[in-house]
Image (tube, rainbow, N blue to C red):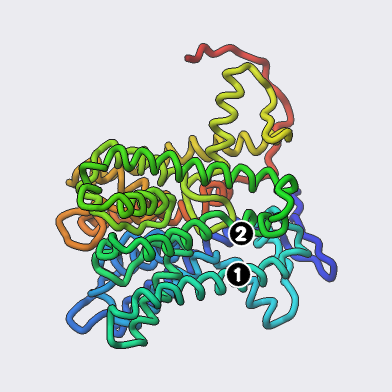
Amino acid sequence: MKHQKYYFDNDFIVKKVNPSLIIVFGYLVIIFSGTLLLLLPISVKEQNSLNFIDSFFTATSAVCVTGLIVKDTATFFSPFGKLIILLLIQIGGFGYMMIATFFTIAITKRIDSNIRFQTLSEFQKFSSEQIRSYIIKIFIFVFSVEFIGGFLLFLRFKNLSENILKTIFYSIFHSVSAFCNAGFSSFSTNLYNFRKDPVILFIFSMLIVIGGLGFVTLRDIKMNLFSIKRIQTHSKVVIIMTSILIIVPLILFILFENNNSLSEFSIVDKIFNSYFQVITPRTAGFNSIDFGILHNKTIFFIIILMFIGGSPGGTAGGIKTTTFYILISHIINSLKGRENLNIFKKRVDQDAIKKSHFIFNISILILTLSIFILLITEDQNPFKMIFEVFSAYGTVGLSMGGELKNVSLSANFTVYGKAIIIFLMLIGRVGILTAINIFLTADRKEHFLYSKTKVIVG
């Protein structure tokens, strides 16, 4: 007879639920709610109409903070529709579980055990007792950063329109979208018209980087700002990888594109645009230059950046900087014939190493199958489709575009193609481990071992 598992809390006992299932189900509920709201006539401008698949695609892209669009956000949606997209981005950026926890605290002054358990599954760094203060501090921090970003953008956007309310909305929309690494813009040309405004590019870049560092790392840096030695290994890895993934691509971008997409710029503008364009593939999705004219070699390393993504616990997607660091370090370590992987005089747990390899391998498998299916269902440029797939999985939002103006290549896809991109965006947002855990049961154990055999590999 199988026994039910229960999770014990101080005051009561509740049945233990699969947190991965709850997380995915929660995202789907929010996406469907957003889909229905966007289908309302009030959400689009009078001459426009939206079908279900395009509404579902837009809602998924917003909640998964991706930024791939099948309709021009600036000209297709009404102010109400843009507000719905903004709210979906904010919910997606926070993570719906944190929002559920926050409102539970606000209303009941306590954390329900199921919610606490599910929250811990997303933020395993903290004990359940720390969740309350942690969530509140995150909300305060996020709104503070978005407010400051919005104010600074307002100072630059104030000449765009005589309507001050519209300018305020532009500022808030882009501040939230940048911090949440969403890539949605209320301008048809994204940030292309601001390509020669270094202040705008710098503000966006800072919002993207702060959002992509991860709440855990930001908290650690704040607590140990004047005592670097006390910064945790996780945060050190994040800082190192973030720095490397900015500096190296920045140099490559300037070298590759100096006489191509950067040819119209001054030296200062070349540096700022290059800096911006190597930050935004780490799941932000904004662009200040035309991606359609980039060299293939530039596109290729941008694909790599999209695949790696940001850092755990933040608003970014991808396989994460820490996963990539451990993966590469373990490969180098193995080539040297060492059994243990040591980082900053600390031994990395074998479970973390196994998870890193698992995340990488499953991600490559999913991406390969998705590309194969799209090659069957879609009649589009294969290289552009590969770029679109990596952009969706990394929740980036960059696109090389198609025949339709001011929208992603996905706008040209059939219903089947759009469904594949929707699937990739959702998996990319909830995380591959969360998605896989829905189908795995931790209770199954091996009660006996078979005899060993040899298989020739390599």
- The location of residue 216, given as percent across then percent down, is 64, 56
Please tell me which residue is depicted at 30% across the width and 85% down the height of the picture.
42
SS at mark 1 in the image? helix
User: Looking at this view, is 55 or 230 the one in front?
Assistant: 230
Please tell me which residue is depicted at 80% across the width and 66% down the height of the picture.
13
Task: Note whether 395 is above or below 46 in the view shown.
Answer: above
Specify whether 437 is left or right of 164: right
Q: Residues within 10 Å of mark 1 (few under 14, many from 20)?
A: few
Q: CA distance from mark 2 to mark 1?
A: 9 Å
User: Looking at this view, is 393 or 7 the one in front?
Assistant: 393
Q: Residues within 10 Å of mark 2 (few under 14, many from 20)?
A: many
Specify whether 81 is left or right of 355: left
Please tell me which residue is depicted at 70% across the width and 61% down the height of the picture.
117
Please tell me which residue is depicted at 60% across the width and 21% down the height of the picture.
334
Check disc 2 and give the amino acid type: Phe
Give the residue pinned by disc 1: 141
Task: Note whether 101 is above or below 360 in the view shown.
Answer: below
CB under 8 Å between callouts 2 and 1? yes
SS at mark 2 in the image? helix
Quarter-of-image position of residue 7: bottom right
Check disc 1 and give the amino acid type: Phe
Give the residue pinned by disc 2: 215
- The location of residue 172, given as percent across then percent down, is 43, 76
Comes first in the chain, label 2 or label 1: 1
- The location of residue 213, given as percent across then percent down, is 55, 54
User: Looking at this view, is 330 or 256 the one in front?
Assistant: 256
- The location of residue 116, given as percent across then percent down, is 70, 65
Which residue in the rendered view is the most extreme toward the front?
Answer: 267
